[in-house]
Every structure is written in C-alpha cells, then in structure tokens.
Amino acid sequence: MSRFGSATALAVALVTIVAVAASGAGPAPPVGAELEALSQPPSFSSLASQRIYFVLPDRYRNGEPANDKGGLSGNSRQTGFEPADPGFWHGGDLKGLTGNCTDTKTGLARIKSLGFTAIWVTPVVKNQVYQGTTAGYHGYWGLDFTTVDPHLGTDQDFTSFVDCAHSLGLKVYLDVVVNHTGDTISLSTTGFVPPSQVPYRDCHGKKFNPARYVTRKFPCQNAKHMPNNPYVLPPLRHVKSPAWLNDVTNYHDRGNIDFSSCSAECLEQGDFFGLDDLFTEKPVVMNGLAQIYGNWITKYHVDGFRVDTARHVNAAFFRLWVPKILASARSAGITDFPIFGEVFSTDDLYVSQFVRDRGLPFALDFPFQDAAAGFASGSTNAGALRDRLDDDDYFRTPNGIEPTPPTFLGNHDMGRAAFQIEQKGGGTGDTLLKRVLLGYDLLYLLRGAPVVYYGDEVGMIGTGGDQQARQDMFPTQVQDWQTQDRVGSPPIGTGSSFDVTDNPIEEHLKTLAKLRDDYPALSTGPSIVRYASGKVLVVSRFDLHDAREYVAAFNAGTTSATVTFPVSTSLVGFRPVFGGVAGSSIEYQWKLTLAPMSSQLVRAESPLTLVPPTPPTLRVSGDDLTSMWRVSAAVRGLLPVSVAFAVKRRSGGWTRLDVDDSQPYRAFLDPAKFKKNEKVQLVAVVRSLDGKTAVSGVVPFTVHAR
C-alpha cells in the first residue's frame, strides 16, 4: 500500500471534505475558456528530453599543454599544476574537451556519439589558485567571474567549445556559483557566529534583519560593524572581479558552517568550507550575480545553468535572481533556459521546498539517486522508488511544468555510479556490472533527464567522493588511479580511457539513448507505477501523441520474477522493444517474467481505447507528511489522464494550484500562503488524452493551520 493511502494517513488527517458532483450553492465550477485554460495538461521543459554528460574539463583531455600552468610560474602552490596529485590541475582544457568537432574518439563528437544531447561543465571562471592543500581545478573557487580560467584556455576557447557543441546538436549547461567566491577574507574566528548572538548592524550601529530588505534599499554598512571583524590582506584586496566582489560588506562574514550542528541561518550565512559566503540578501549582490551570469548567456549563448550549493542562499534569492537570468536568456533569443540547482539532501520533501516555495526551477534529484542506487544494488526494495515518484507531486507548481529533474547515480562529490552501487552492497565483477547497467536502465526508462558522470562509461569506480571521484580520462600520472579496478574493463595503467571502446556500459548507454530517441514517451510521457514490491518495479509510460502505452519493468533480485499487474491497454498485448520478454495478456492486465538483475521495455500493439472522463471525486484532508492540506482527486478507470486543481479566493476567478498527470492525483494548500482561516473554493478538472474534460463538484474549505 502507498504511504499516502495508509490507515495512519487517514487517522492523522484533521478534516476530510468530499465533493462528488457540482453543488447548487456557492460559485459555479469553471466553464468555457476558463475551463479550457485551467485544464491544460502539464508542459515539459526542454530539460526533460536531454541526456546530459557531466564533466570536469581539467580531467577530460589536454588539448593545449602550453596552458597547463595557467600562465603562472613557480611551484605547484603558485601554479596549481601537479598532474600526479589528485587535488591539483592536471592539464585538461577546453580545447581538449572540444576536440576537432568531427573525431568521435575524443572531444565533443565522441560525447555526441555516445548518445548524449547536452554537456554540463563545471565552472570555467578564473579560480583561486590554491587553498588549504589543493588547487581550484574544479572551478568552484571563483575570483574573476568575467573570464575563463587560463588553465582551461581563453574566452575564445570557450566560444569555440559552445559553437562546436551547438553544431553537433549538443546543449551546453554551465555550472555557476551564487553562494560563495574563493577565500580571500580573514575573520577573527573561524566558527560560525549566529545572528542571535551578534546581529547585523548598519553603519550607525543599529540592528537590522537583512531578510526584510531583499527588495528595498539596504541599510548602509561598514566593515567595523560586520559580525566577525572581516579583513583582507593587501595582496588580495583587488583580486576579485567585478570590483564589487572585493567589498567585505558584500559577504556574511559569520565564519564556517558546522555541518554536524547547523541551523537554517548557519547553512545560509556560513562559509562553505571556508569560502567567502556572499550576502545574497543584498540587492547589490543579487543584481550583481544576475549581471555576471547574464553576461555569460548573452556573450556565449549557453543553454542553461546548473547552480552549485543552491540550498545555501537565502530563501528569497531564486525568486528574484531567476527572472533576471531568464530575461537575459530571452534577450539572447533563448526562450527555454533550464536552471537546475544542487540541493544536497535525500529528503525529497525538503528538496521540494526549493522548487515549490523558493523559485528554483529544478533541483538535481538526490532523493532519486539514493533510491535508485539502493534498488540497483539489491539493498533497497522497490517501494523507495515508488515513493520517490509519488513525491513528484510536492514539486508541482501552478506553472504546470512537469517535474522532470536531472537524475543520476553518482557524481563528483559523492562518488561515481559504480562506487555508489558497490558501497550499497552491489557486489563486484560481473555482478556489479549487471547492477550498474540496471541502474542506468532506471535513469533512461523512468522520468527525468539522465546525467552520466564522465568516465563512468568506461567503468571507472574510484574509491570515494570528491578527489577520489575525479580521475583523468587521458593517461593519468596519479599512481593509485593507474591500478584501480574498473567495472567491465581492466585497470587503465598508463593508457588512455579514450582507447577503451568496448566497455559494456558505453554500449549500453548508446542503446538506451536510442530508445529515448525512438520512444519520446520515455522523456515526456506520464507515469503510473503499476507494481512495486520486493525487488520488482513496474511503471507504465504513455505517449501523449499516439495514445500508446509502454511498460518498463525492473528486477533487482537474484532470481527470476513473474508478476501480474494492471495496464490501460486491453487484450491486444505488448511487444518487446528492449530486453527479453515472456508475457501474456489478460483483460487490462499483463503478466511478465523478468530475469535476475534485468530490465524490460514493452510497447502496446495498438493505441489506447479512449472514453470520455467522468467527474472526479475531490477530497481535502490533512497531508500525512507535511503541515499542508492535501487536495486529492479520485478518478475512475485505468486510462491516463491529467487532473488540474484550482482554487477560487474571495475575489477573482479560478486559479490553478497545479496539474498532475500521474497517480496519485494531488495538489497542496500551504496555510502559510493564505490568510488565517481564509475561506476558499476548490475544484478538480480531469482531462483525457483527447482533450475531453469533466469537473468535480466545488468544495468550500477554510484554510487554517494544522
């Protein structure tokens, strides 16, 4: 049973209100043009159809040895270059990543040949050369945000990189940082100084709360009234660009985040591992960051942003910054500019707040990663993936854009895909290979934009996260990396990973990419979880254009499994398009046998038989996982539909809460967004694939805190 339909959920609901037909009193349900506008099915960002290759340019390929030291001289601390040390620059650059735009052995043409449609690169801005014991090879310690780091090449090299990508049909997603810069500011103490102990004061010494000034004239400030006595050594006072980044009052100056015991204020105002934390509440900072990154769009025509450390900025930041970035994109002729942020948490209810409440368009799907890696390893049952897919409803907003976040199995911080699956009990050797392939099946056959981390396609495993997940593709001088085990291939030794062209993972990714090309339902089709028990997950996907059902089935167990589950297609049966199949049709049911650690995709032999929808039953009850009110619709039948939920307040017409195309059909009312005890009216509109609609009765409801 789904956790949303449990007896516990019903018991904790404070109130349940049900409507089954239009009532005679109160406002009428929407009709005509208003009904048509409200009932529109979810739309999809261009992100939904992408397959993304994620890469650190320094670790991919060295195209220009002359820039290895970034134009600097001296030892490794002075140049940042030490190819035998995993924490320093190794020589990879933009020319190496670009290649000649035709050779499929290296460069962007290779990435295209693997079936990818987009490339995500870590920040390319000029970085602090050295901090602590490592160099800024990864790009996240920016000092000059207006130009390319010389270790990676020139601004013209980045132009050539983007131009080549676009000529190959690849989108370019640029990693950007809005939370911090490189570390140049020294503080009197390294520990976090909370606002409750030392509040912010203006230049006259008067206390103020910065959250109240995000859209107003900000109080005057000076260094002596900042909370932790910031100062900058003379050689570092003008190293940042644009110039406003050199002002210490444009930073929170509160000391380092303590991740073991940190409040929300600490996460937002503390220095991330010592990096200077930007005072993003200040309009001059927010507008400055919009100007910086808007210029990267208009100058280079990149196609989207990945936002680093997105949970560490203030709550209002994205609501203000994102519209400015989208305006810059429109000025460059880019009408669909995806922005996805890093909210490093496996709690999908927590992550959803950044999309639903904070204005972040998409969040990297860390909760899905946790569930998918666990399932693929055999250590987690299918229920975790079912729950994650169900929880997409918490990410829905009135704009109607379908939650299709970037999904992944591993990354540069937590460790590679094979490492993640291995660490969760996925075995070694051939067993680990099968489980890694199963993991990629989940990424490509379920909703979301699959992200593959560079080097995973040639079997890199690594021994951990961060530095130990950032191996070289070109011949490495790091001795440990030469002898590390790989999955599907032997250790690389002193050879080049570009010579590894027969790894089963690489071939599997090409096959999965073609499936996504051939069957758009895998990218932009609604989902219905049909079966989730033990080690077996079955999900129906639907093509909205030809009303065709697909079924993706996954078995993470070590023995074969035969399961029977409901479908929306009657009697005609399904044919296999991926993986072996042994199936039989019963009326509106399908019986399928899955081999151990395998996946299958089948396609209905004929389109769905569509029938007009009937009015849904609308219910309002207390949500069992949050403090919100759950508005749900019960829809008859097995056919895929979309359900729009709308609210009518005291004045004005009906406005959409969200639109949901996957069971369970739900929306949420957050009491914090309504007046105390505000009286509203609610309605649900079901829409079939052929555009026919049916409307629930209107439900009156008083929104109060739970």
Image (tube, rainbow, N blue to C red):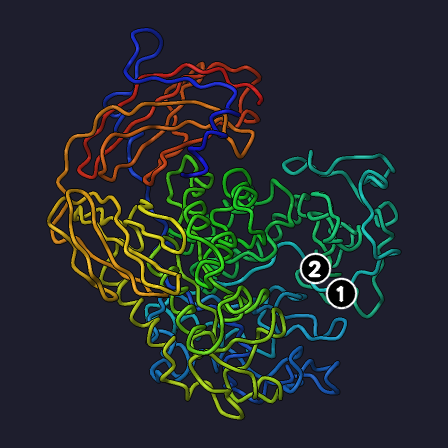
Evaluate if marks 1 and 2 touch, with contact meaning CB atoms under 8 Å apart: yes
Residue 270, position as x, y percentages in the image: 74, 51
Q: Secondary structure at mark 1?
A: loop
Q: In the figure, is residue 11 to the left or right of 45?
A: right
Nearer-the-camera pick, 236 or 596: 596
Q: What is the three-letter code of the residue carrying label 2?
A: Ala
> For the point 51% across and 31% down, which residue is it?
624
Residue 366, position as x, y percentages in the image: 52, 54
- Which residue lies most toward the front here? 559
Q: Identify the residue position indicated by label 2 in the image.
A: 243
- What numbered label is drawn on residue 238? 1
Q: Is residue 8 above or below residue 387?
A: above
> For the point 50% across and 39% down, which residue is it?
356
Q: Quadrant of residue 523?
A: bottom left
Quarter of the C terminus within the rendering:
top right
**How many numbered marks appear?**
2
The mark that comes first in sequence, 1 or 2, is 1
Mark 2, other Cα within 10 Å: few <14 / some 14–19 / many ≥20: few
Q: Quadrant of residue 557?
A: bottom left
Q: Secondary structure at mark 2?
A: helix
Residue 499 seen in this snapshot: yes
